[in-house]
Image: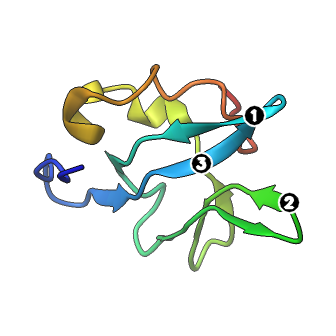
Amino acid sequence: MVQPNCPGPGYIWVDGYWYPARHHYRWHAGYWTMPPYAGAYWTPSYYQGGRFFGGYWMGGRGRFEHDHRWDHDRRFRDGGRAEGRGRGHGHGRGRD
């Protein structure tokens, strides 16, 4: 996959990842997004001990769960080829 051009200042790229969905795994394509506040940095999703931990924002204001409603513009994800509309991943507060 070729990373699409950055849509503007302040956006960061979140790499694609596999996530559990019921009894199988689904691919969430990479996408551009804005941090929830200045100075926040992205901590990617990971697996540890057979468990999935969703990505989140961290910084001076503490941990902040990502809300996929921020990423509804398909132009910013996977060159417009991202699956769905960023829904159904349940990564924490603001579940979509």
In space, the residues marked 1 and 3 are separated at their CA atoms by 10 Å
- Spatial separation of the CA atoms under disc 2 and disc 1: 13 Å
The reply to whether dot 1 and dot 3 touch (C-beta < 8 Å) is no
Question: In the image, is 22 to the left or to the right of 7?
Answer: right
Q: Which of marks 1 and 3 is in front?
A: 1
Say which amino acid is labelled 1.
Answer: His
Q: How far apart are marks 3 and 2 (CA)?
A: 12 Å
Q: Which amino acid does label 3 sit on?
A: Trp
Q: Which mark is residue 24?
A: 1
Q: Is mark 3 on a helix, strand or loop?
A: strand
Mark 2 vs mark 1, foreground winner is 1
Q: Quadrant of the C terminus?
A: top right
| Circles 3 and 2 in contact, beta carbons < 8 Å | no
Q: Residues within 10 Å of mark 2 (few under 14, many from 20)?
A: few
Q: Which residue: 40% across, 57% down?
A: 14
Q: In this view, does 20 lie to the left or right of 15?
A: right
N-terminal of the pair, mark 3 or mark 2, is 3
Q: Please state the horizontal and vertical placement of residue 59, each as a whole percent of the image.
A: 56, 77
Q: Residue 88 location, x and y as percent?
A: 66, 25
Q: In this view, does 2 lie above or below 61?
A: above
Residue that carries the numbered disc 3 in the rendered image: 18
Looking at the rendered structure, the kind of residue marked 2 is Arg
State the residue at coordinates (20%, 53%).
3
Residue drawn 42% across the image and 58% down it: 35
Q: Is residue 41 left or right of residue 53?
A: left
Q: Is mark 1 on a helix, strand or loop?
A: strand
Circle 1 crowding by C-alpha within 10 Å: few under 14, some 14–19, many from 20: few
The residue carrying mark 2 is 51
On the image, which quarter does residue 94 sit in? top right
Q: What residue lies at 75% left-to-right and 34% top-to-bottom?
A: 24
Foreground of the two, 26 or 87 = 26
